[in-house]
Image (tube, rainbow, N blue to C red):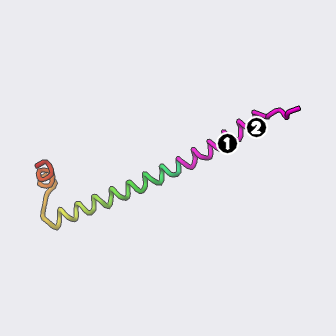
Amino acid sequence: MARKANYDEKISAIEAKIAKKQDELKALKAQLNEIKAKKAQDDYKELTEYMAANNLSASEVLASIKG
C-alpha cells in the first residue's frame, strides 16, 4: 500500500521557505534603498560642486535644462 503523504508537514516546510525568502527580499530591498540614497547624495554633491565651480545658481541650471 502506498504511503500517505503528510501534507501538513509539506505545507509547513514550504511556508517556512517562503518566510525565509521574504526576509531575504526585505534585506535586499533595504540594501538597495541604502545604495540608491548614497548615489543620490553623491550625485547631489557632484552637482553642487559643479555649480560652485562654474558660479551657477539653481535657477540658471534649471533654465539651461528647460531650454
Q: State the mark number for residue 29.
A: none
User: Predominant secondary structure in magenta?
Assistant: helix
Reply yes or no: does residue 65 show up in magenta.
no
Q: Which residue is mark 1?
A: 16
State the image coordinates of residue 16 (x, y, percent, origin top left). 67, 42
The local secondary structure at tag 1 comes to: helix
The amino acid on which the numbered mark 1 sits, given as a three-letter code, is Ala
State the image coordinates of residue 33 (x, y, percent, origin top left). 42, 51
- Segment tinted magenta in the rendering: 1-25
Reply yes or no: does residue 10 show up in magenta.
yes
Q: Which residue is mark 2?
A: 9
Horizontally, residue 9 falls left or right of residue 35, namely right
Horizontally, residue 10 falls left or right of residue 20, namely right
The local secondary structure at tag 2 comes to: helix
Which mark sits nearer the N-terminus, 1 or 2?
2
Q: Residues within 10 Å of mark 2 (few under 14, many from 20)?
A: few
17 shown above or below 53? above
